[in-house]
Image (tube, grey):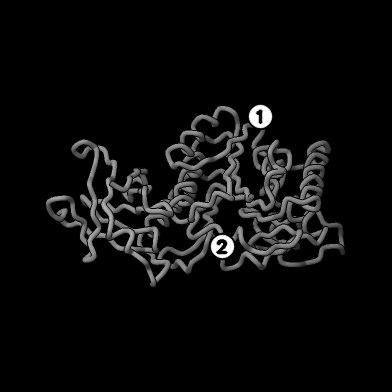
Amino acid sequence: MNLIYSCVFFNEEYIKLLSLLLKSFVIFSSYDTNTKYLVICNPEFKNEIVQIFKSLKIDGLVWSINLSTVFEACYSRLKIFEYPDITKYNKILYLDCDILITNNISNILNLDIEDKLYALNEGYSDGPHDWWGSDFWKSNTNPKTSVFTTCVLLFNNSITMKTLFSKILLHIYSHLNNKLQIPNCYDQPFIIYNTVKDKLHNNKKLIHYVINNPWYNSFNGETISHFPSSVGDYNTKYNKMNIYLSFMFHVTFNENIDINHICNSKFCLFYPNYPENKIPLNFSLNNTINNSNNTYENSYWKAIDSFLIIVELFECELLIKFNTDFTSFIAIQNKDFSIFHGIKI
């Protein structure tokens, strides 16, 4: 079993980032019963996160823990080996909340990895900022090597990784007990310093799978797109994610697309403000959308891959993701990223 996890604490607005992340997860990644998604949060966020999981029909997990500071919230991801059910999982993937899944997550989860911490390359151990652990090295011991960002972390559930995470936490606790200044990048310098010191990092393998700050209109098949800004800067992150998610409505993943299961079936979209809250859909071979009597005016659809289509209907755009046997689907609307559902009839 694989485990993906994210953390949300204190700033309730970050739940909106998490919601966009999870929406992109269900739309652009294939459903995999071998993978679970866990959110670690403070207790007062639990019910809202459970409702997001339900609305997206994700069999998600929530682990609520009590924390008292922003710094604790940042290094909560290092507590993953304290999760009560952690022994069920073999491979673990951590994701920041300011991320969109933009391709099948199995591209990453199926990678062959060693007992190392896999992350995207960024910066150098000797600075110029303290973001990458430069302040922790003693004189003449800094390896002056390329390091990484901690927005995405891939690792095995192993004694080696558990020991590394414990060592990082002990370093943080010691730092706090000595009343030393907290770095601007919170726990990232601690993670990088200890991982590099123990020669347990790989910052090359995720290149081409993960991208930082992608340019709009420049999608190259990356699996994870990260939208960083200053720590706690919700508005910038949210706006970047919204713009890029809108752009993702118009990409094509596969030129050889099987549309037989779509064209040979009739579906029903449950859509508020439409008579009986239902819209009958019949996707024709000429890319129009029909009901039982006629073609919807100005309607259009196009396949993005064998399970994902874009639909233009009632002056709205919808991304519709079918399940593996084409008996149901989930849809996301471009105007406000609302979620709808539908079934085969």
Residue 52 as seen in the image, left or right of residue 155: left
Q: Nearer the viewer, residue 17 or 177?
A: 17
Residue at far left of view: 293
Provide the residue designation for mark 1. Answer: 66
Q: As shown in the figure, which amino acid type bears the numbered disc 1?
A: Asn
Residue 286: image x %, image y %? 21, 66
Examine the image and state in which quarter residue 275 appears: top left
Residue 135: image x %, image y %? 78, 54
Q: Residues within 10 Å of mark 1 (few under 14, many from 20)?
A: few
Residue 47 as seen in the image, left or right of residue 284: right
Nearer the observer: mark 1 or 2; the answer is 2
Q: Residues within 10 Å of mark 2 (few under 14, many from 20)?
A: few
Residue 77 as seen in the image, left or right of residue 24: right
Residue at far top of view: 44
Q: Nearer the viewer, residue 221 or 301?
A: 301
Residue occupying the point 54% across, 40% down: 60
For label 2, the SS is helix
| Distance (Cα) linking label 1 and label 2 | 34 Å
Residue occupying the point 28% across, 45% down: 269
Provide the residue designation for mark 2. Answer: 107
Q: Between disc 1 and disc 2, whose residue precedes? A: 1
Q: As shown in the figure, which amino acid type bears the numbered disc 2?
A: Asn
Examine the image and state in which quarter residue 304 appears: bottom left
Residue 33: image x %, image y %? 55, 49
Residue occupying the point 64% across, 50% down: 1
